[in-house]
Structures are given as C-alpha cells and as structure tokens.
Image: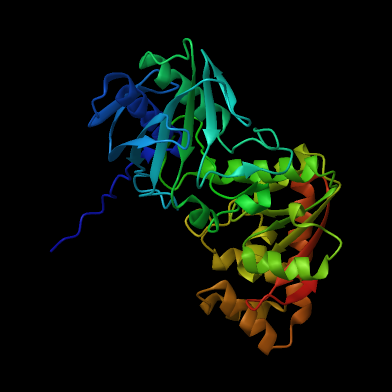
C-alpha cells in the first residue's frame, strides 16, 4: 500500500483560562435559572465565539448555609502535549454579603477567587501580583465577559466566583511553576483562549516569564539550559546562584540569548550536552532536530577548521549522530577539539547576546565535563 506523504493537520484546543470562563458562565446561569446547562458558549478575545460541553454541575451548601452552584469543563488541549489536557476546570458561584479576603474585583460586584489546585503567586516579576491566585489577566477578562453575558452582577449582594482544578496541585509538579514562584497548584493561563499544538509561543512565554522573575529577584546572571540534566549539573557548580537564575530554554537558543540581553543580564551561563553545543558552534539558532538536523558535512568542516586533522575529520562523515562524533573524538584522544567546539559555541552566544557567556558541556549523567 502506498503511504500518503501528506501530514496530519494538528488539532487546536482550549486554554485553562477559556475553560474557566465557560465553567463560570455555566455555574452563573445554573444559579440564575435553576437549570443545569449542557453546553456553554462564550466570547473570545478576538471576537470569535466557541462552545464547550459542560461535564458536570452540582448544587452545594456552603459552610454558612449559602447555596453554591458549580460547573466543570474538561480541558481539551487538542494535539498539544499539555499536562492539563483532560483536567476538569471548575467554577463555583455564590452570592456573598461582602467579599471575603483575597478576592479580585472583576467589577459589577463580582469577585474572583482561586480554589483547590489553583496556585498562588509567591515571587515578583509575573503578570499577577504576589499573594494573588495565579489566574492571568486575559483569563480574568474572559471570566468577567462570560459572566456579563450571563447577566450576573452583584446587585444588592456580591457575587463570588471560585476557580478550582481538583488535580491541579499534583499536575503542577510536572511544570516549572515552582521556579516561577507559583505554589500550591496550576496557573490559569491563556492570551487568546486557544492552544496551538506544540506551540513555540508557550515555550518562549515561559522563557520570558522565567527571566522576568530572575530580574525581579535582583539577579544579574542567568543560567540557560537545554534540559533538566544540564541545569542540575551547572547548579551543582554555581552554588551561589538561587533557583530563580535558572531558565529552561529547551531548543530556543537564539531567542533565549536575545531575551537575556533584552532583560539586561550581565552574564549568561549556557549549559548543554554535546549535540546542542555542537549545533550552537555551527550557528544553528533553533536546536531541535526538526529545525536543525545535524548536518554532518558542516560538522566535519567545523572540526577541521578548529584544528582536527583533515583526515580524521573526514572519517567523521560516516557518523550518524553528534554523540558518535564525540565518541570518536574521545577514542582518538582529541579532547582539545571538544573544548574548541565549546569555545566556538561561546563565541556564537556572545555574538548573538552581546553578553559575557560561560559555556558548560554536560554529560548524560549530569557531570560538567568542560567549562569555557
């Protein structure tokens, strides 16, 4: 059977913020009409409208006997590998004589709260103030707009809306929230309401937010790492730096270098394993394999240009991976060539960022093999 070369189009999904807004509107209508809705349509920031299936509703009794109305939306992240995909995002609505402490005013007598599984901001530098629930500005606006459509206002009494994620605290352990200073649960996120599959925007937004936190902490140095192993290895050496200095850049090398410069850091500590640093030495701005597959011919020319005898460099053309190149260099006792690659990566990083850069070559076990 002939296999089609056409790629499957990846499916978009919805952010936690959009789900929270739909849940809030559903709960508000349940309170207003006494009837549980099956579906809920809400407006999005770009003027479009989207419909959500209401997964669960409940009429509850609060600690002081007040009636509460809860609705849940199951997050569908589409084809994006999001840790919150399938999580239930809940909103609980009730009338309140006066707003409780910690509420965020949405206007019209409506106050927003973070409940179970929603994190709280503990460090400055984010879009949300320290001490507030980690519900970002656009989700707040979406929740307010959805409630306005439901015609729910405080009137003579205030309206309290609590957003919760039952599995949020557990799911947050799989994120970088603790690094950003979000404790006790997830962030309610989104700037458009839509999750784009395998989104570069999500990665770069996290990189920027991490640097915002580092600057707000008064740091002048930042650690850019390609992964957890590289980061752990470097922090074992740089014991003077707090965890706020760490920025998990993944494959977004050029973006991260430029962002570090824009944030005004005086020094960059660049940590990575051999394959990523080899690509950096070759000037590849985005080091994921789909964007920068190792070009063996270019790598051979680089190694020869860095002093490896041409005959030995040519033998590297038979290599399939960067790891194999390093293995052959080590077997030939060419450790100085590996160091020269790190030096070239350093020069590339400094040319892009304009900052002073130290490069750390980290082995798979987490040991720092070379510092340049």
Residue drawn at point x = 54 percent, y = 24 percent? 111
Identify whether 129 is placed above or below 42: below
Split into 4 quadrants, where in the image is the C terminus? bottom right
Residue 240 lies, in percent from the top left, at: 87, 61
Of the pair 261 and 181, the residue shown nearer to us: 181
Residue drawn at point x = 72 percent, y = 70 percent? 233
Asked whether, in this view, residue 284 is left or right of residue 271, the answer is left
Identify whether 72 is placed above or below 87: above
Residue 204 sits in which quadrant? top right
Of the pair 142 and 14, the residue shown nearer to us: 142
Residue drawn at point x = 33 percent, y = 45 percent? 10
Task: Please indicate, yes or no, whether residue 271 appears anywhere in the rendered image.
Answer: yes
Of the pair 276 and 35, the residue shown nearer to us: 35
Residue 9 sits in which quadrant? top left
Identify whether 19 is placed above or below 244: above
Task: Please indicate, yes or no, whether residue 272 appears anywhere in the rendered image.
Answer: no
Residue 214 lies, in percent from the top left, at: 76, 46
């Amino acid at each position: 059977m002939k296999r089609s070369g056409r790629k499957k189009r990846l499916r978009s999904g919805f952010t936690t913020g959009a789900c929270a807004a739909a849940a809030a509107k559903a709960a508000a209508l349940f309170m207003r009409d006494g009837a549980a809705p099956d579906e809920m349509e809400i407006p999005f920031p770009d003027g479009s409208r989207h419909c959500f299936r209401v997964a669960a509703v409940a009429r509850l009794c609060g600690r002081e006997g007040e009636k509460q109305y809860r609705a849940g939306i199951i997050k569908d992240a589409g084809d994006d590998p999001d840790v919150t995909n399938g999580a239930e995002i809940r909103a609980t609505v009730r009338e309140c004589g006066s707003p409780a402490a910690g509420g965020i005013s949405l206007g019209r007598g409506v106050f927003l709260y973070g409940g179970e599984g929603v994190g709280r901001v503990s460090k400055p530098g984010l879009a949300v103030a320290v001490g507030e629930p980690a519900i970002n500005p656009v989700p707040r606006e979406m929740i307010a707009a959805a409630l306005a459509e439901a015609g729910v206002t405080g009137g003579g009494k205030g309206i309290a809306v609590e957003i919760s994620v039952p599995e949020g605290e557990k799911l947050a352990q799989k994120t970088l929230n603790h690094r950003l200073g979000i404790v006790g649960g997830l962030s309610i996120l989104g700037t458009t309401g839509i999750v784009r599959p395998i989104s570069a925007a999500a990665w770069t937004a996290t990189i920027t937010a991490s640097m915002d936190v580092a600057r707000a902490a008064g740091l002048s140095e930042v650690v850019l790492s390609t992964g957890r192993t590289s980061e752990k290895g470097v922090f074992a050496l740089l014991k003077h730096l707090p965890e706020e200095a760490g920025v998990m850049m993944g494959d977004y090398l050029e973006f991260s270098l430029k962002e570090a410069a824009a944030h005004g850091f005086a020094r960059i500590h660049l940590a990575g394993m051999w394959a990523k640093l080899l690509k950096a030495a070759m000037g590849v701005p985005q080091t994921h394999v789909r964007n920068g597959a190792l070009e063996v011919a270019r790598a051979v020319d680089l190694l020869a240009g860095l002093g490896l005898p041409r005959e030995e460099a040519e033998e590297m053309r038979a290599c399939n991976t960067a790891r194999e190149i390093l293995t052959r260099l080590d077997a030939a006792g060419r450790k100085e060539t590996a160091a020269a690659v790190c030096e070239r990566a350093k020069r590339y990083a400094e040319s892009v960022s304009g900052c002073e850069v130290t490069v750390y070559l980290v082995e798979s076990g987490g040991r720092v093999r070379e510092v340049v």
